Image (spheres, rainbow, N blue to C red):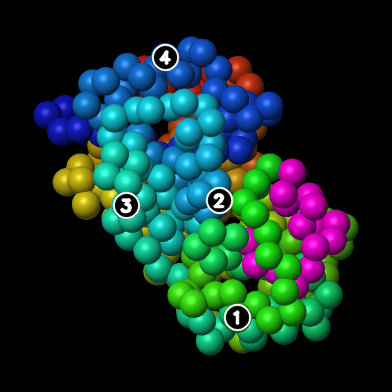
């Protein structure tokens, strides 16, 4: 590691930086303040859209100088200090209605986003489950394309009861879109759909290049499948003690404690 260069620490939110009650414990918060006060960069790297990530950032009063938000699995990179996007891509517009039509054929809930809202044809059990945590306002419409003018950051397919059905949808979608889109699970119920040039790992590389930080000076911590690419891309990839076995197998190190017991604090402190 080049000790003369600044560092970037990338954090997944749920199951990683946040405790079960969606807070950051005091020891971890103190470590983050010392890390950023030393001139290093803090980055939330999440499957959530930027507005949801920013709501968490503001709600927890993080206010760290040199903060960035990577949203929708790396399709958006936002500078908090500058108040602007430094990178943005999305699902090609022509694919959006095709994906929605396929999801209806397989009876799997699927929604997308515009700049300000979740956009969906359904508002049932799956949407209610999703919006327990994600507070983004919702538009329910029979004509999704009327509400979308630019490529959406991502789409998400949700199935709460029948994973095999969701897998059949995923396989059919993979056959339809080929390598244009990445399809992966952020938890057992959520299938994330986003451009293949994105991904959390791509966000690590893009932001490091943008900030002129050597990749060996980057850290990334996560717990679920959609965190693997950033764990592999970073100079030091960290799996939480509560991570899935697959994530742990891809990491350089595993925390001793879980997200409810300051699992990341020692790693942040060591990186200062």
How far from the left and from the top, in percent, is residue 177?
56, 83
Indicate whether residue 129 is drawn in magenta.
yes
**Alpha-carbon span between mark 3 and mark 4:** 27 Å
How far from the left and from the top, in percent, is residue 126?
80, 58
**Alpha-carbon span between mark 3 and mark 2:** 17 Å
Residue 73 left/right relative to 167: left
Q: Point out the frontmost of discs 2 and 1.
A: 1
Identify the mark nearer the N-term, 1 or 4: 4
* Position above or below: 131 against 87: above
Q: Point out the frontmost of discs 1 and 3.
A: 1
- The residue that appears at 49% across and 56% down in the rendered structure is 73
Q: Secondary structure at mark 1?
A: helix
**Alpha-carbon span between mark 1 and mark 4:** 46 Å
Residue at the spot of label 2:
48
Identify the mark nearer the N-term, 2 or 1: 2
Residue at the spot of label 4:
30
- Image: magenta residue range: 118-132
How far from the left and from the top, in percent, is residue 53?
51, 44
**Alpha-carbon span between mark 1 and mark 3:** 26 Å
- The residue that appears at 22% across and 52% down in the rendered structure is 209
């Amino acid at each position: 590691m080049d000790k003369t260069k600044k560092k970037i620490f990338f954090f997944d939110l749920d199951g990683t930086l946040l405790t079960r009650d969606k807070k950051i414990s005091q020891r971890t918060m103190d470590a983050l303040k010392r890390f950023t006060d030393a001139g290093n960069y803090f980055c939330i790297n999440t499957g959530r859209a930027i507005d949801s990530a920013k709501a968490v950032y503001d709600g927890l009063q993080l206010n760290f100088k040199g903060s960035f938000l990577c949203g929708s699995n790396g399709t958006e990179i936002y500078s908090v200090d500058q108040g602007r996007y430094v990178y943005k891509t999305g699902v090609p517009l022509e694919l959006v209605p095709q994906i929605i039509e396929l999801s209806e054929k397989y009876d799997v809930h699927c929604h997308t986003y515009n700049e300000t809202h979740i956009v969906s044809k359904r508002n049932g059990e799956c949407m209610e489950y999703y919006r327990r945590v994600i507070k983004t306002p919702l538009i329910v419409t029979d004509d999704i394309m009327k509400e979308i003018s630019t490529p959406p950051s991502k789409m998400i397919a949700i199935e709460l009861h029948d994973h095999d059905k969701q897998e059949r949808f995923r396989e059919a979608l993979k056959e339809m879109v080929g390598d244009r889109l990445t399809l992966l699970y952020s938890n057992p119920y959520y299938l994330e759909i986003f451009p293949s040039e994105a991904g959390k790992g791509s966000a690590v590389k893009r932001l490091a290049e943008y900030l002129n930080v050597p990749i060996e000076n980057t850290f990334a911590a996560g717990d679920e499948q959609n965190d693997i690419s950033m764990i592999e891309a970073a100079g030091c990839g960290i799996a939480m003690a509560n991570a899935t076995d697959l994530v742990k197998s891809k990491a350089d190190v595993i925390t001793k404690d879980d997200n409810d017991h300051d699992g990341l604090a020692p790693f942040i402190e060591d990186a200062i």
